[in-house]
Image (cartoon, rainbow, N blue to C red):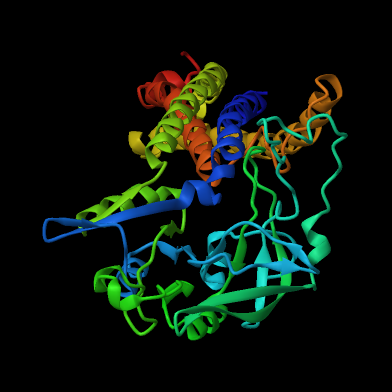
Amino acid sequence: MTVLATAMGCSFLIVLASVGFGLQSSIVDGLVGDRLVTEIDIWGKESGGKTSNELTDDDLNALRAFEHVKTVTYRNHVQQSLGKTVDGTNVSGPTIIVDFEAETKAGFELSAGRLPQAANEIVIGYNIREQDPVPSADGRDETAAQPKQPSEPASGWIGKTMRLEVTQMVNGAEQKTPLDATIVGVTKQPTREWLKDRVVYIGEPLLEQIEAITGTQFGAVMPAEPENVPKEQLPRSPDEPRRYGEVQVIAENAQYVKGIGERLRAAGYLNHSVANELEQINIVFLIMKIGLVFVGTIAVLIASIGIYNTMTMAVTERTQDIGIMKAIGAHPSAIRRVFLLESGMIGLAGAAIGIVVSYALSVAVNATLPVLIESFVEEKLPDGFRFSLIPPVLTALAAAISLGVAVLSGARPARRATRIDVLRALRRDV
C-alpha cells in the first residue's frame, strides 16, 4: 500500500506537470519550426560609419558562416514587368528572383506541383488568377452589384507555358524578346486572408537569360539615351557585383534566434526578429510548469507520511533482529543503510509504477480530450495538438523527487534503529 501511495503521488506529479509541457509544445514549439519565428530580417549593414541597405555576395557568404544558421535567403525583383501571359491571359504581379534551394531549407511550401528543377521552370503565387475589382469612372466598384464568380485555382496552370516578353533598348528603340517558362508549382495559400500572393517566382538560371537579353542586372531597361544620364543612375552591368535586398537569415531553431541576432549586430548587420516576444511567452510557460511541479510534489510529500509510518513499524517489528546485528558487531551506519535502502526501494518502486501509469494517462488524455472538445465545443483543434507531454527530464525529476522524499522519510526511523539497546532488544523489552 505504501508503494501504491508513492506511485499515485509520482504519477500525479508527472501528469500535472505534463500539461504545462504539452501546452507549451502545442502553442509555442508549434511555432518554433515556423519561418516567421526562426527568421531574422537583415535590413542594413553598418560599415565605416555609413549604413547600406544592400548586401553583396560576400555578405551572404559571411551570414551563412554564422553558427546555427540554417540558410540565408533573399528576394530581388526583376526590374520590368516582362509582359507575362498564359494562354493569352495577362498576368499581373511582380516577378521575384529567389534561391529555390535556400528557400526549401527555410520552409518554402507549395500547395500543388513541385519546385523548379530546370532553368526555364517557375513557381506562381496562390492568388495569381484572382482578379481585383475594377472601379468605374465615378470610383464605384463595378463588380460589387454582380454575383461573385469563384476564381480559377492557380493549380490549373501547372504544366502550362508562361510567355515572358523581355524589353530592351536597341538603337534607342524598344525591342521585345519572347522567353518561355513552364509553370511547375503553386505556393501555399497565405495564412492571412487579406494577403494575396500573385508573385511569379523565378530562379537564378532564368534571371541570367533575362540579363543576357537586357545587358543589365535584374533585367533593368537601359534608358533610350544613356549618354545623357549620370553614370551612377544607369543600371548595373551583370558583370558587376550583385546587390541583394530582402535578405533573411534562417536559424536552425528558435532558441538560437536571439544569439544569432546579437552576433549579427556585433558584426555590423542591422536585423530584426520576433525572438523577444517568444522569450516572454516561454517565461510564462516556465513559471506555470514550476508551479505545477510544486503542486505535484505536495502529493509525493503526502505519500511520504505512509513511508514514515511503514519504516517506523519496520523498526519496531525488527527490534530483536537489530539487537542480533549489533551483538555480532554490525556498525550503526550499516544498520542505518539497511533501512534507508528499504525506504529508497519503496520510493523507486513507486516511481517506476507511477511513471508507467502517467505515460498511459498521457496517451489517454491526448486521445480522448480532443474528441470531447470537438464534440461539445464544435471546434476543431490543430493537427498534432497535445494536452499532455512527458519529456525525459520530467520523468527523471519525478523519480528523483520520489526517491529523495522516500529516503528522507526513512531517515528518522533508520536513526532510531541505530539507538536501540542490545540487551533490551534481545529481551524484546522496547
Q: Is residue 416 left or right of residue 123?
A: left
Residue 169 position, x and y percent, is: 48, 79
Q: Is residue 95 visible?
A: yes
Judged from this view, the residue extending furthest toward the left is 48
Q: Is residue 156 left or right of residue 139?
A: right
Q: Is residue 413 left or right of residue 114?
A: left
Q: Is residue 416 above or below residue 260?
A: above
Q: Image quarter for residue 45? A: bottom left
Q: Is residue 429 above or below residue 277?
A: above
Residue 189 position, x and y percent, is: 70, 49
Q: How many marks?
A: 0
Q: Is residue 116 visible?
A: no
Q: Is residue 45 above or below residue 347?
A: below
220 or 238: nearer the eye? 220
Q: Residue at x 61, y 58 (%)?
A: 199
166 or 328: nearer the eye? 166
Q: Residue at x 63, y 75 (%)?
A: 165
Residue 132 position, x and y percent, is: 70, 44
Judged from this view, the residue extending furthest toward the top is 430
Q: Quadrant of the N terminus?
A: top right
Q: Residue at x 77, y 58 (%)?
A: 154
Residue 255 position, x and y percent, is: 42, 48
Q: Image quarter for residue 121? A: bottom right
